[in-house]
Image (tube, coloured by chain):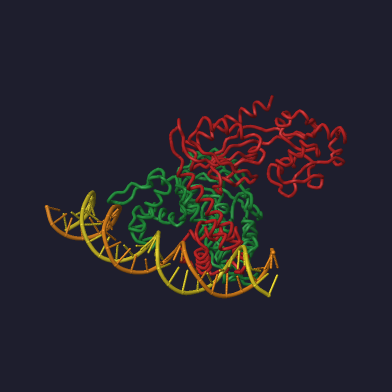
Chain colours: A red, B green, C orange, D yellow
Amino acid sequence: MSDLTDWTLLRSFLAVLRRGSLSAAARETGLTQPTIGRHIDELEAGLGLALFTRSPGGLLPTQGARSLLPHAEAMEIAFAALKRAATLGGDEGNPRGTVRIAASEVMGTFVLPPVLAALRGRYPGITLELALNNRTDDLLRRDADIAVRMTRPKQDGLVARRLGMVPLGLYAHRAYLDRYGLPERVDDLARHHVIGFDRDDHSARAVAAGTLPISRDLFSFRVDSDVAQIMALRAGLGIGMIQKAMAKADTALVPVLPDRVAIELECWLAVHEDQKDAAPIRALFDGLAEGLLRWMDAAGR
Amino acid sequence: MSDLTDWTLLRSFLAVLRRGSLSAAARETGLTQPTIGRHIDELEAGLGLALFTRSPGGLLPTQGARSLLPHAEAMEIAFAALKRAATLGGDEGNPRGTVRIAASEVMGTFVLPPVLAALRGRYPGITLELALNNRTDDLLRRDADIAVRMTRPKQDGLVARRLGMVPLGLYAHRAYLDRYGLPERVDDLARHHVIGFDRDDHSARAVAAGTLPISRDLFSFRVDSDVAQIMALRAGLGIGMIQKAMAKADTALVPVLPDRVAIELECWLAVHEDQKDAAPIRALFDGLAEGLLRWMDAAGR
DNA sequence: GATCGCTCATACATTTTCTTATAGCAATTC
DNA sequence: GAATTGCTATAAGAAAATGTATGAGCGATC
């Protein structure tokens, strides 16, 4: 069985899994339906495992196929990383290539755009990709070249730089407080509308949870998206956690329990040791550090 | 350029990089020299990057090729993991498939073999692979399905179980102490032959370094291999660090400064969340936990 | 200094793989 | 209930990839 040598078969596998039919997969990949069909047959024969149940409506993945998915995705991600790495070049003054930056939703949405805009102007040869999510393993999965993270990167093989602390606080829209009043003690929060996460309890939140009586039950408005939480906060849906700098920029937001609730997240920049010497990576790493430090400095005032 | 769709080209790339010539790569892959040559041409054209400088003696990788290597290896590892995952099956009573276990050199050499031998008998349908190294990112790289680690696994997506503490101590062979005497204070170590690491300062050693005045300069016999260190210790080359349980099993070894130097490493078992429910993974995870706990219990006496 | 052993490059034959075209099946729509 | 639209499966010709055979360069060895 292990005489399976054609890595490309997994492209077709992924396409079928995602599109749900041979025909749709053919359209996605630019191949044809019989070809994709033979690829799946070949894969099933090679692995000795039924991957899909054929039907006139399409192909339904088996449990086995689902268990292979993460590995096939890992191959796809690694291939994309390889293609990016091949574009890297140029010298210190004029770096060229495509660089993928991972960041949390909030950083990527509210903080990074102006920083990246400046870098874009300075380095016209660099094409930027931005991967927004709250997982901390992007670099190790090679799903990004540089990561902006709110926790200390601890994995082997990474080079990390600590940029500083980002202060967070509880805020609410003035209109909300006019109606429901300003909590005076932490316990009062239980009687308020608190905006929080739904199920996705990622690490930044875990940090916050350590210093606050935060649990899922407390929240009367739940979204997993941090950005949606901030939008809800600004719209006056309730009391929520937000970076102090962002809150100050919105004059309608009023601090809640500022003396009792003070949370700081560490801000880190990380890169693979393998890649840190490529000109575009180095340029962006330094540029991001500079831009983010300036932002944190301005925010501190 | 980005119309590069054939993932299999990277198999040839890896083979050429490793063997150093098209012909040797052809022998390794079962293809022929012209085919491998065409693959490399196609890859270079697709990536827009010179990968090798051709010579009558073989192909010399460029810097660019070297920078792509880790990504190509990541694809290869993911593919191997996919093939392993495809073998997993059976039920709780009779799990089937190939499982790759990562462990430190010392654990894999001295501790795991009897544990695995017992599991082998109990689960005849499971084929075992053992990956011995001291990196802690095997699981995330999918270079292993289960990891036995001496530090707490902290990455996202892993399920870990703490097994307990493994005590280490300084020991020396009786013959060594007869000749050089028994150190009475920690400072005396500077005048002794201490066996230690060369350059590979991995995390278990870092833990130890925190509680001991250990630095590279102290060592008069340096090897990166932990196993070689233990063998050197047993051969009487000097004073070295070893698990107390292993030292006790060798009656010629005498504890050195047992009251002053007491180090304990945590022992952890970890598995990918994706895979934890597959019958063979679960069987080995539980079996390893059981076997290692029994070993730690026996060692404690 | 000729030979052997290794290498890569090229031209041509062969095999494999892909596409095109068509048939058949189930569900939905008019 | 016939027509339409989605799908898979199969067969045959076109295209692409692979293999075979051969030439030529470099270095070690006798």
Image coordinates for residue B88, horizontal then vertical, percent: 58, 66
Q: Where's the C terminus of chain A, which quadrant?
A: top right
Q: Quadrant of residue B144?
A: bottom right
| On screen, residue A284 above or below B254 | above
Q: Nearer the viewer, residue B70 or B127?
A: B70
Judged left or right of residue B189, residue A132 is: right
Q: Quadrant of residue B245?
A: bottom right
Judged left or right of residue A235, residue A154 is: left
Image coordinates for residue A26, horizontal then vertical, percent: 53, 60
Asked if one can make out residue B111 in the rendered structure from this viewpoint, the answer is no
Judged left or right of residue B98, residue A134 is: right
Image coordinates for residue B73, horizontal then vertical, percent: 47, 52
Q: Nearer the viewer, residue B168 or A123?
A: A123
Asked if one can make out residue B89 in the rendered structure from this viewpoint, the answer is yes
Please give the name of the residue rendered at 45% of the width and 49% of the height, measured from the top-left corner: B69
Image coordinates for residue A8, horizontal then vertical, percent: 48, 59
Judged left or right of residue D17, residue B111 is: right
| On screen, residue D24 above or below A117 | below
How many numbered callouts? 0
